[in-house]
Image (tube, grey):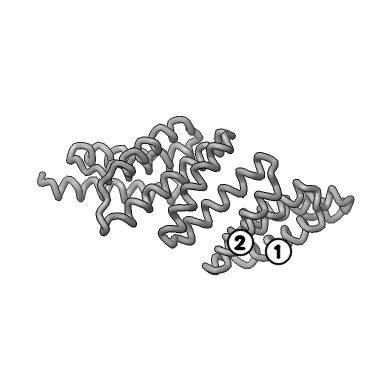
Amino acid sequence: QTLDARKAEADRFLQQGNQLFQQGDMRKALLSFEEALKIYEQINDTISVGQALGSIGNVYIFLGEYQKSIQFLQQALTIFKKTDVTPESKDTILTFIGMTLGNLGNAYTALGEHRKAIEFFQQNQKIAKELGNKASEGAALTGLGSAYDDLGEHKKAIEFHQKRQKIAEELNYQKGIGAALYNQGISYASLGEYKKATVLFQKALAIFKEISDSYGESLALNGLGSVYTYLGEYEKAIKSIQ
């Protein structure tokens, strides 16, 4: 097989892995990414090796194997950072670095290492801003908000969730707006501001209903159930939770 044919074969495995990942078949996705990695290593395609390593690391997050995930993501990050950047390849390499940093943030969040997660999300946000990638910046802001909530710094968390909402509104990304409102509701509820939380959960619920996002709907209803309980409005709470 020629070098081009080998690369095309590896690219097919990578693409197949991405499709399986989107379908939620993580074990099969992992096998495809591993096949791609093997070929990329054989043909010394360094950037693609980094891509495959990053994809494997991301799968391990979804499989709940966070330490394993971090190992692969760190390897990918090292490769991308060592790559000689040309003016043509700069944006692509920075995009890969940003994605990898975001996934490292997710892995450390899952491990409960929130300070470490914040470092990675901050780097991710900086790169996303530099690239003008609003979607990626929004994801980084969500990660930062959630990390500060987990640390009990709810006022700081609200600032990030509000920034996230603004970006989602600019992009007209309804799911992102709903999620940002819901996350603000969680933060305000944690501060004991239940009336404010109620309004935010209701707004989130309306958006999730409109876009037929049943998972988002159930989260918002659960949030409402909790705040109605704290407010002593038990009938409303029962209705929401049911």
Give the quadrant of the N terminus: top left
Give residue 140's position: percent from left, percent from top.
52, 51
The residue furthest right is 232
Q: Residue at x 65, y 49 (%)?
A: 157
Q: Which residue is mark 1?
A: 203
Q: Residue at x 44, y 50 (%)?
A: 23
Give residue 103's position: percent from left, percent from top.
46, 44
The residue furthest top is 67
Q: Residue at x 32, y 45 (%)?
A: 51
The secondary structure type at the circle numbered 1 is: helix
Mark 1 or mark 2: whose residue is earlier in sequence: 2
Number of numbered tags placed on the structure image: 2
Q: Amino acid at mark 1?
A: Lys
Q: Which mark identifies residue 122?
A: none
- In the rendered view, tell whether residue 98 sits above or below residue 135: above
Tell me if 8 is positioned left or right of 91 in this view.
Answer: left
Mark 1 and mark 2 residues within 8 Å of each other at the beta carbon: no
Q: Is residue 242 visible?
A: no
Q: Which mark identifies residue 165?
A: 2
Mark 1–mark 2 Cα distance, whole angstroms, equals: 12 Å
Give residue 32's position: percent from left, percent from top.
32, 42
Q: Amino acid at mark 2?
A: Gln
- In the rendered view, tell whether residue 176 sits above or below residue 81: below
Give residue 115's position: percent from left, percent from top.
57, 37
The secondary structure type at the circle numbered 2 is: helix
Crowding near the residue tagged with mark 2, few <14, some 14–19, many ≥20 C-alpha atoms within 10 Å = many
